[in-house]
Image (cartoon, grey):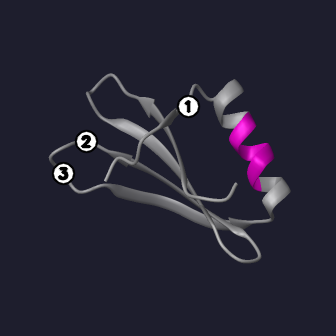
Amino acid sequence: MARPLWLVRPRNDGGCDYVNFVPGSASVEMREGSHLPPQMPLLKRRCWLQRDEAEQQRRRLQLEGGFRHSEPLF
């Protein structure tokens, strides 16, 4: 994971849940939130993971959580 990665899951209300992985020098920041335009995005949680943990989390979100790769939301 060399650059930021966005995963998005649409919601019934027209908004979406998102997870953004931002790689750093030693770890990966994972930001979870929701967005319902035209409102500002809501950051629900953020944490820092080791690179292998971030990759496992990405796979889990895509396989089990219904998230799909996306262009940046904002």
Q: For the magenta stretch, what is the residue range?
A: 54-59
Please tell me whether residue 40 belongs to the stretch shown in magenta.
no
**Secondary structure found at label 1:** loop
The three-letter code of the residue at mark 2 reads Leu
- The Cα atoms of the two marked residues, 1 and 2, are separated by 16 Å
Q: Is residue 68 above or below residue 6?
A: above
Distance, label 2 to label 3, CA atoms, is: 6 Å
Q: Residues within 10 Å of mark 2 (few under 14, many from 20)?
A: some
- Determine which residue is flagged by label 2: 36
Residue at position x 74%, y 36% from top?
59
Badges 2 and 3: C-beta atoms under 8 Å apart? yes
The tag on residue 1 is none
Write the residue at 81% across / 55% down.
53
Q: Nearer the viewer, residue 54 or 70?
A: 70
Q: Amino acid at mark 1?
A: Phe
The residue drawn where x is 80% and y is 44% is: 56
Q: Predominant secondary structure in magenta?
A: helix
Mark with earlier residue (1, 3): 3
| Sequence-first tag of 1 and 2 | 2
x, y percent for residue 30:
61, 59
Name the residue that disc number 3 marks: 39
Labelled pair 1, 2 in contact (Cβ < 8 Å): no
Front disc: 1 or 3: 1
- Image coords of residue 54 (percent x, y): 74, 54
Give the residue number, with chain letter if any, for mark 1: 67
* Horizontal side of residue 11 vs 50, given as left or right: left
The residue type indicated by label 3 comes to Gln
* Residue that extends furthest to the right in the rendered view of this protein: 52
Quarter of image, res 51: bottom right
Q: Secondary structure at mark 3?
A: loop
> In x, y percent, where is residue 19?
53, 48
